[in-house]
Amino acid sequence: MEKQLEKVLSDRINSLSESQTLAMTGLARELKAQGKNIISLSIGEPDFDTPDFIKDAAKKAIDDNFTHYSPVPGYPELRQAICTKLKRDNNLDYSPNDIVVSTGAKHSLANLAITILNPGDEVIIPAPYWVSYLDMVKIAEAKPVIVNTSIETDFKVTATQLKNAITEKTRMLWFSSPCNPSGSVYTKEEIEEIAQLIKNYPNIIIVSDEIYEHISFTGKHESIAQFDFIKDQVVTVNGVSKGFAMTGWRLGFIAAPKWIADGCNKMQGQFTSGTCSITQKAAQVAFEADPIVLKDMQTAFKNRRDLVLSLMAEIPGLKLNEPKGAFYVFPDVSSYFGKSYNGQVINNATDLSMFILNEGLVALVTGEAFGDPNCIRLSYAASEEVLTEAIKRIKDTLALLK
């Protein structure tokens, strides 16, 4: 008898969850391909095009033959541009040797998990959180420790909550501001309180995900690394995907204590080496530019947020906070749990998301993907016309539930 190949994947990969944001986006594409008029508000991607001056720099890089292997942590001139940006925008002092450029901020986070965490280490993650945090921690054989927040506290964690979660095994704290999925933005006072707590635990590293820095409606972005007494325990993660509408270019970076940067450089050298050389030259001019070039996009997102909140406020049963950044709303929809339509009972946010997709033809993401089963995430990275139609569909669909 011919021996059959045993199709067994590793326990490591079998333990991972599929990204539910990407899964819902893929499902929406499939339904569109079937001819259904789907409005997809599931993916975290600006609907703007990359600014022309950045594209021009990429074209010039090709003509100038920046088509060879780049240094693993990024071109020196790019890392210097990042240092200049961090000083100009965030009042953070770093040298190019503290910077590691990677293939997106997601890659930067994965590098950090594998570089720093050992089996059994604990990582505190406030919920709601970005979908990939948990599985990155798990792939490093560490343990995610979830600290729950709620819409009543604007989905922000307090220093007291964090202190209660710290154990002798705690190695890292991961959080984002502005936050995906809630849009919450921590104030200077709130992050200083967290910093004052963590300084008492010198073995804990703070991973501060600031990829939505330039999509903030508070006036000034606050980085936790600004406090000198905690800076040696902070890794700032950022990139160009959201603020500069460069999702497909794939470039992120860390600014970190040199020993961490050296570790991530070593890790990256064995897996991917340097990120795309053309992308690096494009990102360099993005970081060198005055952030004022992003003003029109920021204004458009704020106008959309206000439109979405005003329209969703007319839907009975939704609880809303006012997001201060990013481009999401994250309403609490638990008042619809237990209701039904045509025999279909809505038990949770996942059921409700699928109901809205199938009956209303609007793709959203269940809050369960982000650690909050009472909510759904809606991206307002779409035109005001599309958003108005989408929320009308959502309102009409939810009205079916009794």
Image: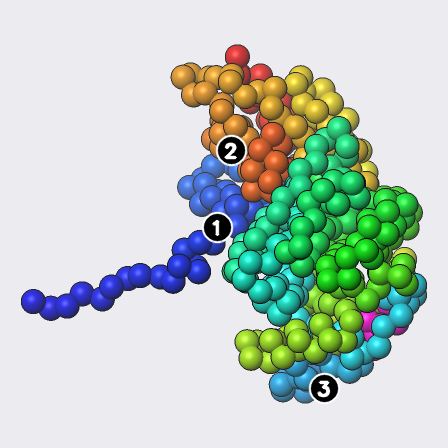
Query: What is the number of the mark on residue 278?
Result: none
CA distance separating discs 2 and 3: 50 Å
Q: Which mark is residue 64?
A: 3
| Amino acid at circle 3 | Asp
Residue shown at 84%/53% (left/top)? 195
Left or right: where 392 falls relative to 208: left
Return the residue nearer the eye: 306 or 156.
156
Q: Residues within 10 Å of mark 1 (few under 14, many from 20)?
A: few
- The answer for how far apart the CA atoms under marks 3 and 1 are is 42 Å
Residue marked by disc 2: 350
Residue 398 appears in the figure: yes
| Place of residue 205 in the rendered image (x, y in percent of width and height, measured from the top left) | 73, 61
Identify which amino acid the numbered label 1 is placed on. Answer: Ser
- Neighbourhood count class around disc 2 (C-alpha, 10 Å): few under 14, some 14–19, many 20 upward: many
What distance separates the C-alpha of mark 2 from that of mark 1? 15 Å
Identify the residue position indicated by label 1 in the image: 17
Q: Quadrant of residue 243?
A: bottom right
Note whether 368 is above or below 119 in the view shown: above
Relative horizontal placement of residue 67, taking residue 400 as reference (left or right): right
Number of numbered discs overlaid on the protein picture: 3
Q: Amino acid at mark 2?
A: Thr
**Overall secondary structure of the magenta stretch?**
helix
Residue 152 locus on image (x, y percent): 75, 28
Q: Is residue 82 magenta?
A: yes
